[in-house]
Image (spheres, coloured by chain):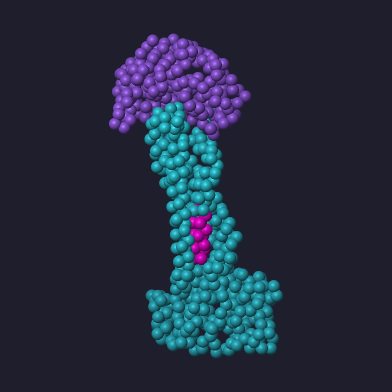
């Protein structure tokens, strides 16, 4: 379902060349739950961005559902992301001028829209425990609540793949546990998860675990 | 189904920083308001002079030598003034090559009109037999009906047809009211036969507090129509050469005089407007560059969630277009209100005639000003919009962190 072949990404820091991701190969089946652990700066977030079509690799291919995403035009890649992939970022990624419900519905502004989407979005907000905050703005929410909204948004377009970067980074244990439960439920529904984390407890939930060191990925 | 769209997101963005939004709207409003009001005043003054000179019906005015400035002032601003020359000038002018028709007019010193009218009225005596100016303004005018005690008044005089007016103790019956021209000479004057004017002057020593010093041998101006194929300027030169002691002025020169009179002022106004426009353009460009810079992570987020480059471009452009259109609209409304409210003061200070433009012109001008405001926003936001569209999602997210 997801196949990475020889994926490489280098950056330049002045004259110095930094290898963020080096010759990564990975094959995941649909509905897998994968964690990637590693130190800060080991290339985890860059790898996630390459997989999600957010930054172009220097070498290698990313094939999702049979589509080599880096052969698509920019518009086609945007459409592909909108339909098939969603993200949970490290940062509080909510739009401050939109309510909780509008933030969850945001991907629909770029193409995904169908009957019943608003009802589905509401059910996701309820699922993350914020039913009473539907029309609240992000500035009135705690960090944990904002993270829950971002998680609800990650499922609104019913993506085949969710790429999560430290999804429980700044959350307390109880909230972390709730969120992992939501992930498990969505995963049972067939969504593939790739989670980048420092948290070994979160990593243990995954059925397959990878380590990343200096841009090199190893399973186990 | 609630659909989040481009306009919804743009409007929500506008509400994000109200002070910044208000600053852009205000700067555009100043530009649009200045442009709207200045153009309206310029157009109105020109229109007024055009209508006024058309109504005057004369191609050339002949006045006593040395009185040309007074004559121009009287025509442009309606400021009553009197000057006289011998009636024999009329025949001399008639014989000049290129002259098709002549008619005399005599101006009588201004008079306080009635008990309640505070403005001055210029009393003009004309010859109904030869006149091609005053009587042509009244569609149903009959020369035979216009007697020595009849009077035609300009639109600004507070009276109606059929009423009686008394000037220097002489009663007159109002037989016609002229349409508005914007030129005070026509709008604030009262027109009577020359016989009436001389008679009123003669009676003034007995009937009025002030005695008029005008005799039947005196006229103030000769209005001239030129023959086909002759230009007013050329005939004016010929008259100046052939008739001594007079000055002939082509009526279209009056427009030139007003243009000269106002050109520096309007050039200054447009220069200020241009500077304000350039500053507004720069302000919008800088603000939108800041906006794009500030929202890098959000732009990255939008792109990650499936927004295409075109969407990001249109989002910035829509926001700029909405802001500048709103600014243009506010500017036009305020500009119009200011001109309307201070019309009389502006005209008094500029010493020019004014005819309120037609609704159609104002609508077209307003639309033009709003369009210019919109184009300003589009030009200013173009580069920031392109930059936002070109951002690579991952880089935008990283730089925004």
> Where does residue A190 sit, x and y in percent of width and height?
46, 13
Q: Is residue B173 magenta?
A: no
Position in image of residue B326 (x %, y %): 53, 46
* Residue A153 screen position, x and y as percent: 51, 24
Question: Residue sitting at 46 percent across and 39 percent down?
Answer: B291
Residue B320 or A195: which is nearer the viewer? Answer: A195
Question: So how many labels did they put on this image?
Answer: 0
- Closer to the camera in the image, A40 or B347: A40
Residue at image location 47% in from the left, 84% down from the top: B65
Colour given to chain A in the rendered image: purple
Image quarter in which the N terminus of chain A is found: top left
Indicate whether A147 appears above or below B345: above
In-front residue for pair B119/B17:
B17
Residue at image point 49% right, 21% down: A169
Q: Which chain is cyan?
A: B
Residue at the right extreme, as displayed? B115
Residue A28 occupies quadrant? top left
Which residue is found at the position 50% from the left and 82% from the top?
B67
Magenta stretch: includes residue B38: yes
One can see residue A206 in this view: yes
Which residue range is magenta in the image? B32-47
Instruction: Please tell me which residue lies in front, B227 or B47.
Output: B47
Q: Is residue B136 above or below residue A17?
A: below
Query: Overall secondary structure of the magenta stretch?
Result: helix
B358 shown above or below B205: above
Does A75 appear above or below A186?
below
- Residue B300 in sight from this viewpoint: no
Image quadrant containing the C terminus of chain A: top left
Percent of width and height locating residue B86: 51, 88
């Amino acid at each position: 379902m997801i196949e990475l072949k020889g994926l490489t990404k280098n950056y330049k820091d002045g004259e110095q060349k930094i290898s963020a991701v080096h010759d990564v190969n990975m094959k995941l089946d649909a509905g897998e739950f994968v964690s990637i652990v590693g130190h800060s700066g080991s290339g985890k977030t860059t790898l996630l961005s390459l997989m999600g079509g957010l930054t172009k690799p220097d070498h290698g291919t990313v094939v999702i559902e049979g589509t080599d995403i880096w052969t698509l035009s920019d518009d086609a890649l945007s459409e592909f992301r909108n339909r098939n992939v969603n993200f949970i970022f490290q940062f509080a990624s909510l739009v401050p001028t939109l309510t909780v419900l509008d933030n969850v519905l945001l991907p629909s502004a770029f193409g995904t829209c169908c009957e019943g989407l608003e009802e589905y979005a509401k059910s996701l907000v309820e699922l993350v425990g914020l039913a009473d905050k539907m029309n609240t703005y992000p500035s009135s929410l705690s960090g944990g609540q904002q993270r829950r909204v971002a998680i609800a948004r990650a499922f609104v377009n019913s993506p085949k793949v969710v790429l999560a970067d430290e999804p429980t980074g700044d959350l307390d244990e109880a909230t972390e546990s709730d969120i992992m439960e939501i992930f498990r439920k969505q995963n049972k529904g067939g969504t593939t998860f790739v989670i980048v984390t420092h948290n070994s407890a979160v990593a243990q939930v995954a059925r397959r675990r990878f380590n990343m060191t200096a841009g090199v990925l190893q399973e186990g | 189904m609630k659909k989040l769209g481009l306009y919804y997101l743009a409007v929500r963005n506008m509400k994000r920083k109200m002070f910044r939004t208000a600053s852009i709207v205000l700067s555009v409003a100043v530009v649009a308001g200045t442009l709207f009001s200045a153009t309206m005043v310029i157009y109105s003054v020109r229109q007024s002079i055009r209508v006024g000179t058309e109504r005057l019906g004369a191609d050339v005015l002949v006045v006593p030598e040395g009185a040309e400035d007074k004559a121009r002032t009287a025509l442009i601003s309606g400021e009553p003034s009197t000057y006289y020359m011998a009636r024999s000038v009329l025949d001399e002018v008639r014989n000049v090559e290129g002259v098709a028709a002549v008619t005399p007019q005599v101006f009588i010193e201004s008079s306080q009109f009635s008990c309640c009218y505070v403005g001055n009225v210029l009393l003009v005596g004309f010859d109904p037999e030869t006149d091609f100016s005053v009587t042509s303004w009244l569609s149903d005018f009959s020369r035979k009906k216009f007697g020595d005690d009849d009077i035609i008044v300009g639109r600004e005089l507070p009276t109606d047809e059929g009423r009686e007016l008394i000037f220097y103790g002489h009663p007159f019956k109002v037989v016609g009211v002229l349409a508005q021209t914007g030129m005070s000479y026509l709008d604030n004057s009262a027109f009577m036969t020359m016989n009436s004017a001389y008679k009123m002057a003669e009676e003034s020593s007995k009937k009025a507090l002030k005695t008029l010093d005008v005799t039947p041998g005196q006229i103030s101006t000769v209005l001239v129509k030129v023959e086909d194929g002759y230009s007013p300027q050329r005939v004016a030169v010929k008259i100046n050469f052939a008739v001594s002691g007079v000055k002939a002025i082509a009526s279209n020169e009056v427009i030139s005089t007003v243009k000269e009179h106002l050109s520096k002022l309007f050039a200054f106004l447009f220069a200020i407007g241009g500077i304000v426009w350039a500053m507004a353009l720069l302000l919008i460009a800088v603000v939108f560059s800041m906006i794009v810079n500030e929202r890098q992570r959000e732009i990255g987020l939008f792109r990650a969630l499936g927004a295409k480059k075109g969407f990001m471009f249109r989002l910035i452009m829509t926001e700029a277009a909405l802001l500048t259109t709103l600014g243009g609209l506010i500017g036009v409304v305020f500009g119009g209100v200011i001109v309307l409210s201070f019309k009389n003061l502006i005209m008094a200070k500029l010493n020019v005639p004014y005819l309120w433009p037609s609704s159609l012109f104002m609508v077209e001008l307003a639309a033009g000003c709003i369009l210019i405001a919109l184009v300003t926003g589009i030009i200013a936001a173009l580069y920031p919009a392109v930059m936002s569209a070109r951002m690579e999602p991952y880089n935008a997210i990283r730089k925004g962190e």
